[in-house]
Image (cartoon, rainbow, N blue to C red):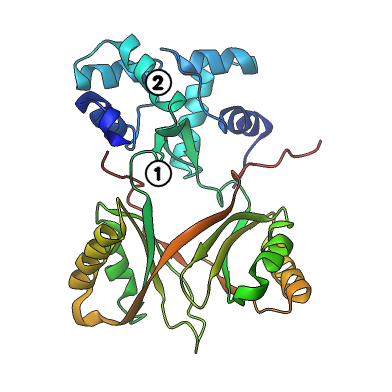
Amino acid sequence: MTLNPTDRAIIEATQAGLPLVPAPFAVLAQTLGLSEDDVLERLKRLKKLGVIRRIGAAPNHYRLGMTANGMTVWDVDDAIVDDIGQKVGALDFVTHSYQRPRALPDWPYNLFAMVHGANRDEVLAKRDQVAELLGDTCRASDILFSTRILKKTGMRLRRKEG
Amino acid sequence: MTGELTDLDRRLINRLQDDLPLTSRPFATLANELGIAEDDVVDRIRHLRDEGLLTRFGPFFDAEALGGAFCLCAMAVPQESFEEVLTKVNAHPEVAHNYERDHKLNMWFVLATESRSAIRETARAIEQETGLKVLQFPKEREFFIGFRVNA
């Protein structure tokens, strides 16, 4: 990954968000002393590289009434976890889905899928939908509800010196 | 909480979870789709953000593509020493998120560092300070379709 200083400056300037004005990239460009076209071309390149996933907004689950969240975890044969993971990740109520290593013997699960809902019953009903999708391919599963946020800090790009 | 949302707000929140075009006037595209004025789109997004319904508007970065290392970790913390362990764990600036969950593994946090080796060092330091094992669950594969909830 090659991020030149100008790309880094754009990333740092947009980590807290874009200005909410009709031409946000022009305002950003002005702040950085670049042209709007240059900023847009660089952002397009960063998106092509996968550094930027999308331009948009993230909803606040809690404020939208989605106060329950369950981390559902599944033990799926490694040979098919890729295929199964794609299907689970495509469910519209699954916000994140990952394959992770097991920690045997305590933790046999290799597929994680985060499910949000208005309450625990709703999350459990969604969990059942995942279970149905997995069918016999799932050997064991569990769900871990979060009971308390213990720390939440934004992930920020550290300023590179020099 | 959701009672205060209009249908238009819901459509806007849902649409904003997809990608906006990288063009000079991205909100004009949204305005066309939603059948409202460009200025109204901007005002509504600002309102939703100020009300805390949207966390932020802008580019979403792949944190690892930016050059960092991340790892989900879990610990089984005895109830009687939970707060004491929590203080020690949260004191590490590398701990980005930390959630209590109802399971034997009851503390789940994300370590965010500059390198893979720093993940291992931080996990080891936490183990030494707390006397508890830190299980590491680095992501091997992400099944990323989109981060969305239906408003």
Chain to which mark 2 belongs: B
Q: Are the residues under badges 1 and 2 in a single subunit? A: no
Residue at 43 percent across and 27 percent down: it is B51
What residue is pinned by disc 2?
B47
User: In this orientation, which residue lies closer to the viewer: B47 or B34?
Assistant: B47
| Quadrant assignment, res B83 | bottom right
**Residue B11 placed where, x, y %?**
23, 30
Q: Is residue A160 left or right of residue B101?
A: right
The percent coordinates of residue A162 (x first, y second) are 81, 35
Residue B117 in view of the camera: no
User: Residue at the spot x=49%, y=89% of the render?
Assistant: A105
- Residue sitting at the far bottom: A105
Which disc number belongs to residue A2?
Answer: none
In the image, residue A20 above or below residue A116 = above
Considering only vertical position in the picture, is B33 above or below B61?
A: above
Amino acid type, callout 2: His
In which image quadrant can residue A140 be found?
bottom left
Report helix, strand or loop for mark 1. loop
In the picture, measured across the screen, residue B24 lies left or right of residue A32, that is left
Quarter of the view holding residue B18: top left
Local packing at callout 2 (Cα closer than 10 Å; few below 14, some 14-19, many 20+) is: some
Mark 1 neighbour density, 10 Å: few (under 14) some (14–19) many (20 or more): some
**In front of the other: B65 or A37:** B65
The local secondary structure at tag 2 comes to: helix
Residue depicted at 57% across the width and 31% down the height: A16
Percent of width and height locating residue A41: 48, 26
Mark 1, mark 2: which one is toward the viewer? Answer: 1
Vertical placement of residue A60 versus A128, above or below: above
Look at mark 1 in the image and give the residue it sits on. Answer: A62
